[in-house]
Image (cartoon, rainbow, N blue to C red):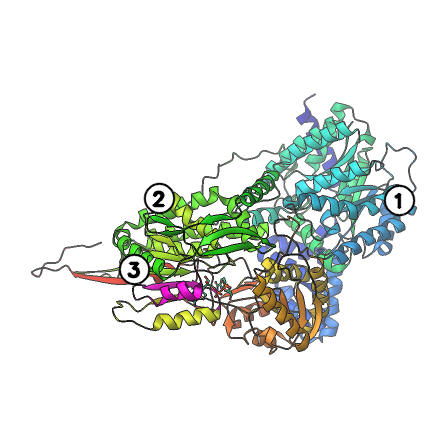
Amino acid sequence: MDIEKRIREIASELFSFLKEEKPSFFDKSGWKGKVVEWSMRDESFKVQLLRFIDVLPALKRDEVALRVFREYLDEAESAPSVLRQGADAFARVPAWISAPIIRTSVRSLARLFIAGANPKDAWASLDALRREGASLSVDLLGEAVVSDVEARRYAERYMELLNFLAPRFPVPENDTSRRDRLDISLKISSFYSQMEPLNWEGSIEKTTRALLPVLEKAQALGASVTFDMEHSYFKDLIIAIFKNVLSEFKGFPRGGIALQAYLKDTKKDLMELVEWAKEHKQRIAIRLVKGAYWDHETVVNRQKGWPVPVFLNKEETDRNYETLTEVLLKNAEFVYPAIATHNIRSISNALAMAEELSLPPDDFEFQALYGMADPVRRALKRMAVQNPVRVYCPIGELIPGMAYLVRRILENTSNESFFRKSFAEDIPLEELIQSPKPPHKKEEGPREGFSNEATTDFSHAENRRKIKEALAAVKKEFGKEYPLSLGKQEVFTEKKILSINPARPDEIVGRVSTAAKEEAEQAIEAAKKAQRSWGETPADERAAYLFKAAAEMRKRKFLLTALEVYETGKTIMEADSDVAEAVDYLEYYGRQMIELSKPRRLGRYPGEINEYIYEPKGIGVVISPWNFPLAIPTGMASAAIVSGNCAIIKPSGLSPVIAWQLMDIFKTVGLPPGVLQYLPGPGAEVGEFLVSHPEIDFIAFTGSKEVGLRIAKRAAETLPGQRNVKRVVAEMGGKNAIIIDDSADLDEAVKGVLESALGYQGQKCSACSRLIVLPDAYKEFSERLTEAMKSIVIGPPEEPSTFMGPLIDQGALKKVGGYREKGKQEGKTLLLREAGGEGYYLGPALFEVGPDASIAQEEIFGPVLSLMRAKDIDEAIAIANGTEYALTGGIYSRSPANIEKAKKEFRVGNLYINRKITGALVGRQPFGGSGMSGVGSKAGGPDYLPQFMNPKTVSENTMRKGVAPEREE
Ligand code: NAD
């Protein structure tokens, strides 16, 4: 029989029953239905509504809840007037009356989709469903798990859930029918707070360990277990954990996993799981869903420059869903299909397919979500469909519940929602049940213009293999000698800088020749020779060298990353980001120079042409630190040379081998000799000599405040014969603060603070070292953060499990250690973690102090955090602004008014809202501060290159003998 015809027949019949089962969510007679209707009509209202729902449970005090409610309503320009009037009336009522009304309303909206706050609370709803013949899968909603304690607590909650529910579900004798069996759904990443695909084996091992007790208990109580699917970044890892768990725990016969039809990869994953089940003779359940994180997948992957893993068009997902259903049903002997959808067309497709395959009803089931399942369940019942229908029932408190509620509202009100089309719009049946027809795809061509270099996606096995090989290859080169690069020559000098591995100080990464004054003079001579013809080289040719260098850098990406890991103690991911940033500078400044080289016509007056052009300054010194050992020297050096100057790099003595790689890359792409030279040596000698030299026209420096100020002073002194006043571009230190207000999302705040404060052990100029927290958030935030700081892994940076590696050297260890001692005296110690090992390891520390404590004022450059209280947002901003630095800063807040205030009053160069404060991207977040944090325009921004050039105005009188050309363009 024609299967398409049969699908439509079934769908029409099902639909006729479904129509009579309108969910209360769409019932316009009640207030919920009205709110839903408004939000479907008006996107801006919907966004504000969802945002308010998201923040509400975090608002502890009634006045704050009411204030934030008004702020959101004010932002929703077209909020329905009834609501506005209501809100105005609310404003006249004391907050203790109005705020609870708002809370109760949102709670009752949540109760549409969440079965209860805890198992006991949910039991009445679950039992009612069961009595009506539904099967159940129960899921515990949870906050993001940021520490071991929280992960353990999540597992315990499942044990409690099983203890409570399983006895209420008698174990069916006949194992082939899953109908009466309780199923629990698990969010796998909540079982191990440090789960990360880069740490593949470690994550599998640790997560499996954490899951086993729950699985054993489920087994003993006769329940089945389904692994929920999360963001695509975790997908392969979750599948691997699933297989590992089933292999280790052979007695566990009822494991299942969810797969998402919106992912382009899912067919391959499904086929592999079918093969796995055949091979292991273990029938696994597969829950086929469409996928709930579409926005996240499209936004986050685009932000990272990674391919978008989901189908962009809903019809493609629907089509894929049908294809996958077919694969599942045809393999029902090996896998147990759970068709989890509310879409009548998708359900009918499964039914028609099963009919054709003559599959008995117990061989597969349907699933639907609590709060949305009833129409589907009842329609199937009225059609006498015999398959089990399982209702997915989330249980949880309000805070974690809100994220879930927001997803459900979004899903139901989206233009593509089957329910919306069925219940809220009069879409003809024919249209609703037609076969999904994906549109013709327009191939996305390569993007023009600048876009950021993508960091490496370590969820791919191939990338994990490549970094492992690169680490081994770099290790083989340990101890190699590196020369200076002077003009055409490579010069080996007697005196060497020993570059050591801070994780194992007895390992010498490289022996690097050291320059003295003599070599510095030679370098200046070579630069003088090269400068003229280089300055006259057309800008696009100069830029082309940068583009070639970028391509060469991409080729060496894994090796450069591995080298950074060994030479500077960066973790793999931190090093990988540094390499990507270096590529960005080359691509960005190259393009910018091409633009700047076009003469700009100023004014439009007859008889004259005024042009604005740039000329190179001459010869410059690039003095770089060790903490972004490739990106910073690449940025400063490429900006200097692409502007037509010659530059001498004086890298930090702690990262000279990576800087040598930069030199080598430019040599490989054929940069003319003398344009860029490499001159490592002691800062106080060769660095200072270059800075003071009369032939030097500019200095690009990044490093500490002390050295930066010294350079500024030395550069200001003019010597006889000097032709230029030196330009100094200096990026210096920071003492950066993050404010956590009383509306902050603490899941996000804890994660963001961890990365900002402890990423690269706190050795970033942008690192967070001060936390300013408002009273309502203080206790919970400080407790969660302390636990999270205890849970991160400290170890050798080449290990994929490591979050924090060693400090850069013995001096840093001593200095930061000194601040830990000071912290103990100046305030209350909340955490002082030790970290032994042969390298320069130091655990993180957290102190509660006053804003004037020295540890809250001085740049520390290590993992020492000051925590401070502020009574309100004004005081918080005043404390944040109360240092001599002004580099980066951040605020975690969901109050529109507080965010606005921070935008206006927080005095920093880079302000970050609801995200980490490190990791500025070239072209997207140009970087640099003011105050004692630096002088000059932002790196990676539109004003950077002109600092290395002299602007020139050329004005030509085009009128001769009273005649002017008619028209001048
Ligand atoms: P540092 O100031 O000790 O050294 C920076 C560079 O200056 C090195 O190459 C060093 O050899 C050289 N140098 C030292 N004394 C000199 C002198 N008298 N004359 C000329 N050159 C001299 O800094 P570091 O320890 O390498 O780096 C950490 C510092 O850098 C921190 O303070 C950090 O905040 C800052 N930093 C700032 C930014 C930014 O963009 N604002 C970025 C990264 C690092």
Where is residue 31? Give x, y as percent.
71, 59
Name the quadrant containing residue 136: top right
Report the number of numbered marks: 3
Label 2 amino acid? Gly
Q: Nearer the viewer, residue 859 or 233?
A: 859
Q: Residue furthest left?
A: 961
Q: Pick whichever of labels 3 and 2 is earlier in the sequence.
A: 3
- Residue 30 in view here: no
Q: Can you say whether 727 is above or below 374 in the image?
A: below
Label 1 amino acid? Arg
Whether 764 is among the magenta residues is no
User: CA gap, disc 3 to disc 2?
Assistant: 21 Å
Q: Pick whichever of labels 1 and 2 is earlier in the sequence.
A: 1
| Residue 131: mark in rendering | 1
User: CA gap, disc 1 to disc 2?
Assistant: 78 Å
Q: Which residue is mark 3?
A: 618
Q: Residue furthest front?
A: 494
Q: Nearer the viewer, mark 3 or mark 1?
A: 3
Tell me: is circle 1 under 8 Å from ligand 1. no
Question: Disc 3, disc 2: CB below 8 Å?
Answer: no
Q: Which residue is mark 2?
A: 670
Q: Can you say whether 377 is above or below 797 in the image?
A: above
- Element type where label 3 sits in the image: loop
Label 3 amino acid? Gly
Q: Nearer the viewer, residue 665 or 767?
A: 665
Q: Pick whichever of labels 3 and 1 is earlier in the sequence.
A: 1
**Is 441 on the left or on the right of 93, as rendered?**
left
- Element type where label 2 sits in the image: loop
Where is residue 260? Give x, y as percent.
67, 40
**Is 429 on the left or on the right of 186, as rendered?**
left
Which quadrant of the rendered structure holds the C terminus? bottom left
